[in-house]
Amino acid sequence: MKNSNVADRVTRVAVELFATQEFANTSVLQIVAAAGVTKGAMYHYFQSKDDLLFGIYERMLSLQRAHLETTLEKGGPADSVLRDVCIDVIETSIDFLPEGTVFFRSMHLLSEPRRAEVTRRRREYHDRISSLIERGQDEGSFRTDIPRSVLIAHFFSDVHYLSHWYSPDGPETKSEVAQQLTDLFLSGIRKEAQ
Amino acid sequence: MKNSNVADRVTRVAVELFATQEFANTSVLQIVAAAGVTKGAMYHYFQSKDDLLFGIYERMLSLQRAHLETTLEKGGPADSVLRDVCIDVIETSIDFLPEGTVFFRSMHLLSEPRRAEVTRRRREYHDRISSLIERGQDEGSFRTDIPRSVLIAHFFSDVHYLSHWYSPDGPETKSEVAQQLTDLFLSGIRKEAQ
DNA sequence: CACATAAAACCGACCAGACGGTATGGAGGG
DNA sequence: CCCTCCATACCGTCTGGTCGGTTTTATGTG
């Protein structure tokens, strides 16, 4: 990392604080104190508190997109692709638990041009998952008696809830949980369950 | 309602604002302005902003408990009881979407003796669901190859995510969604899927 | 290596405004 | 005359953000 030490530490501390407290309830003084720097130093690297928040979204969005693309371009039947996507997105969420918490919780606090962009990129992501499920329905592997919007909600709900219960110190390992949740999800949406 | 008009309106407005913005990002002034009252009037009925938040938790917790008890005491095989519980909790969540948002998001902002109490009552609720699932496993209807903690997380995730995607103005009705999500969930955890 | 210079990194004092909460007092009914 | 209900003005504190200035580092030159 030839990048600034200060910016990195502030970023790391900020996401942790935004996750445990809320964004609006976290003062920049708190952040810089926890990061061991001064406010002047922080405002040298970030234009506003909002930048800190947006930075989290940018990193997570590009990470998600990159992962999804890698998994998608391997190809294969929708059933197995969705399994890979599901496992990957759960494992990634576990790797970035605090980021995920902030991601889902604080979108409406972003300043306006940015919020719109995040919304757009999230919709892109949603649409790709939706297409994948649609393909699976066409291939006859997924049930068609439930609206796709509900299937997608069911997909994202597990991911979203992770940060509310999973702890790396708990009994289950990351890959175990990813396997199990994926299994539960796929068992639910497969055609034979219909 | 022989209760105060002011207190009711403030409560209603507060939960709406806490859900759309964050708790810490919502000022008392904003609340009373939106409710059409003055700060003096509000502080006549509530001791603090924290009271507003705690009130939401109290109402939701007792509502949840009451509903769960009603459903549980009807008895029957765990499989069908869990189905009833699941449908009921989803429908209730839809009836109280903003409350649910605040409920899951802002617990860590409660002042301390209260937060502990909320945590305790939530754990009670969790444990009763856990017992129900355990009974279903004993009766041979639910799969046993996945830790119960993961099954429970899978259960609550759908409920939790509702406020992030469901809209009463959307195409799906409340009872449809409840049926469908319950179906997806149960198809996942049933033994035959193992 | 010495030195000059410029740019980047950083500090800490300082705003103006908003915050949650309070103190005071008046209106109206019992 | 007191008590409930409510409005207004106000308080101390903390907020995100700015700014002038100082130190540190990088670069160029002989």
Image: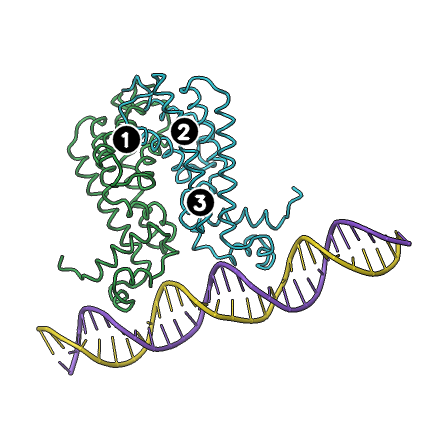
Chain colours: A cyan, B green, C yellow, D purple
Question: Closest to the observer: A10 or A36?
Answer: A10
Q: Which residue is mark 2?
A: A129
User: Which class describes the residues within 10 Å of circle 2: few (<14), some (14-19), or many (20+)?
Assistant: many
Which secondary structure lies at badge 1? Answer: helix
Residue at the (18%, 61%) spot, across then down: B5
Which secondary structure lies at badge 2? Answer: helix
The quarter in which the C terminus of chain B is drawn is top left
A86 sits to left or right of A144: right
Question: Closest to the observer: B170 or A172?
Answer: B170
Nearer the observer: mark 1 or 2; the answer is 2
Amino acid type at image mark 2:
Ile
Q: Which residue is mark 1?
A: B181
- The answer to whether marks 2 and 3 sit on the same chain is yes
User: Which class describes the residues within 10 Å of circle 3: few (<14), some (14-19), or many (20+)?
Assistant: many
- The answer to whether marks 3 and 1 sit on the same chain is no
Question: Closest to the observer: C20 or A103?
Answer: A103
C22 sits to left or right of B12: right
Amino acid type at image mark 3:
Val
Residue at the (52%, 40%) spot, across then down: A59
A24 sits to left or right of B104: right
Q: Which residue is mark 3?
A: A102
